[in-house]
Image (cartoon, helix red, strand yellow):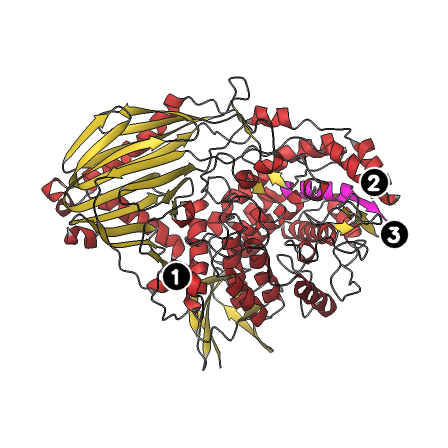
Amino acid sequence: MRDRMTAAATESPYDARVTELTYDAPAANWLEALPLGNGRIGAMWFGGTGQDRIALNDETLWSGSPATTRRLATPLGEVGADALARVRAAVAAGDVRAAEELAGGFQSGHSQAYLPLGDLLLDFEGGEVTGYRRRLDLDTAVARAEYTVAGVEIWQEVYVSAPAQVLVLRLVASQPFTVTLRFTSKLRATTEAVGDNGLALLATCPSSVAPPHGNAAEPIQYSDGDDRGMNAAAVLRAHTDGTITPSGESLTLTGTDLYVVLSTATGYEGPHAAPTRTHEECRDAADAAVRQALTRSASEASGAERGGGRVVGGVLRDEHVRDYQRLFRRSVLQLPSDVESTTDRRLVEAGDDPGLAALIYNFGRYLMIASSRPGGLPTNLQGIWNEHLQPPWSSNYTVNINTEMNYWPAETTSLSECHEPLLTYVKNLAQAGRRTAQTLYGTSGWTAHHNADAWCWSAPVDGNPKWSNWPLAGVWLCRHLWDHYAFTGDREYLNDVWPTLRGAAEFAKDWLVELPDGTLGTSPSTSPENEFIAADGRPASVTTSSTMDLSLIADLFDRCIQTAAALDRADPFVDELQAARKRIPDPKIGGRGQLQEWLDDLPEAEPLHRHTSHLIGLHPGDQITPDGTPELAAAAARTLELRGNKSTGWSLAWRISLWARLREGAAAYRLVRELLKPAGDSSTDYVGDGSGLYPNLFCAHPPFQIDGNFGATAGIAEMLLQSHTGELEIFPALPDAWPEGSITGLRARGGVGVDLTWSPSAATAVLTAGCDTTVVLRHGDRREEVSLAAGVPQTWTIR
């Protein structure tokens, strides 16, 4: 058995303390389970002994349908250009209560929910367990457990292969043992046998699932009509060197080497198509992937692997590892650590453990590879992992910060391919958003609000205007379209997304109004989810020209102007954008030295609010820089000081990047440390500023939201390399707490890869460009122009 166990292991060149999550007990709950995925299939593996659980997700499994979206998108009040004019008149008159009431008329139902498919349960023979160890290897994307039960050594391994589109589970024992497999699901579902060695879970999704914070009378609805939910299936087949006994809805395996392959399929065929695939079609599609994987494993495995009748599946595993490492090994952060504790104890002990920061950086990249692959949907609020039928905030796309943050590390940490699902989704969202803009506001172009889903919901949801009536999600998402070009230089891609960029700019231009001083502003306007104290002494949200609005629109106009120049497009509309851009005012500085969140210096209802929307021009934008706009940069720093270091997990992650852009390494590091603490609450209700990490390193809002993980990775990257000003700045915010370390594969705009190594005595940067180019390197006050030849590494030494 020991030979079979070690044969499957893969030698890693990295310190395990920065590339492994380790535990000495099975997961007691979902937030202790280990996430696995291939971009489409998500799995949470518990590593149990008497009973094990693998919670299953498929990224395309959502409630609802296009028909549901049409039904729920009926506005609650008057809409159109005249209705918009009435809201603007109320704002101009200072009647905030009338403005909020009128804004509510544009609202409609709600977006749909990302759903759990079901659980694969494994029931084992019981007994005393000793020597338990469970781990997730970030270098291979393989999870393993080892333990002894009643004198029998057990070794278990799980991974999800992107090339084969299957989950693989292998169990090896020192003596024959028995395990029974069965499916469960919270959906309407049945289980059936598949041949003499398989099981199928056949499920039906609700036609609508309301968000839990909405308190709907019937939050989960099923339908047999045109708006019925999609069908789905999970199929597994097993092989063993012993026996397989099917028994209705379960499968019992006995042997010393057990091998299970599983895949999923759903009825989803795109955001605008009705999900008409039957249960049987879903089952057959999933089974085809399973049978193909098993056939390849059996026929291509080496003679040594097949010896003794054992099924090892080394071909699938090797293929999976090669595919994954092609992405993961591009960028790995290594910081020294002498801590030998398990991961959950490292969080509790905290202390001087730079390696924990490296682990969270590497874990964020692992999660992106596991949850976002070309051809799929974008990562949602929980990536692709969710166990709730009515998940927090519907586990949807929250596009007033959270979805955008999910993809901040994509380009800077060399995962450009993983950006593709969002880039494609934005084009689909624009198609739906064009109808929304015309219907609700009588404007041209396209819009989206703060919620979206797999069906490209783009309308304002029924709720408080402070989150619902914000129509500039499309404008923000277009920044991602530009960033992909800025890092790759792909002109063909830029030409392809030009209509989407232009459409968002058309809406933004129509949304602008002329203010009494001759400048342009937005009305109605909100700063997402925050409120000010109105003249009547109560919180309010609708006003004129939030700083975020103007920063986003100015940025989009700049990018459209740059795009037209890069593509040699002569477009009269671009001339209009240039004229309008000159009339958009810069952000203002308030009485406390802070960057104002609104046009007027209004008192905040929540001075410590989690959103820092008005700092978007600092990050991810580039309108505010310490060198180019020092007064605004100082005001941004003052804003961060006033907001403090306590907030939700994703908010702290954003602030890491904000402080890094200000070159304040110590301040950024304080927030890294604040994030690397155990989360104190595991409920699914928003409970304030708990933040921190759960035992499996998922980030806490609380509850769990994956944006904090991605934001932390992006923030650490910003601390080490920045390129948004046109210079490649090395170590702009390196904290004293990290006196030595190394990182490979950071990416600068212009397609330049950067590897960094540093110690107290010296540091080097190795740069590799994708094409011949000249860059300006900067470290502190030192600047040097360097010419790079395509594909030829060049070393820059810092002493």
Instruction: Tell me the SS state at disc 3.
Output: loop
The residue under label 2 is which amino acid type? Arg
**Given contact means CB atoms under 8 Å apart, are the residues at marks 3 and 1 in contact?**
no
Place residue 309 in its image quadrant: top left
* Residue at (24% x, 52% y) in the render: 146
Residue 173 vertical placement versus 748 (above, below): above
Query: What residue would you read off at disc 3?
Result: 518
Q: Earlier in the sequence, mark 2 or mark 1?
A: 2
Q: Earlier in the sequence, mark 2 or mark 3?
A: 2
Cα–Cα gap, marks 2 and 1: 55 Å
**Given contact means CB atoms under 8 Å apart, are the residues at marks 2 and 3 in contact?**
no
Place residue 135 in its image quadrant: bottom left
Give the crowd class for mark 2: few <14, some 14-19, many >=20 residues within 10 Å: many
Q: Position of residue 660 (x, y in %)?
A: 58, 66
Give the crowd class for mark 1: few <14, some 14-19, many >=20 residues within 10 Å: some
Query: What residue would you read off at disc 2?
Result: 88
Q: Position of residue 395 (x, y in %)?
A: 53, 40
Q: Is residue 654 left or right of residue 579?
A: left
Nearer to us in this view, 109 or 535: 535
Give the extent of the magenta segment.
499-518
Mark whose residue sits in front, 2 or 3: 2
**Given contact means CB atoms under 8 Å apart, are the residues at marks 2 and 1 in contact?**
no
The residue under label 3 is which amino acid type? Gly
* Residue at (36% x, 43% y) in the render: 162
Instruction: Tell me the SS state at disc 2.
Output: helix
Residue 711 in the magenta stretch? The answer is no
Q: Is residue 258 left or right of residue 554?
A: left
The residue under label 1 is which amino acid type? Arg
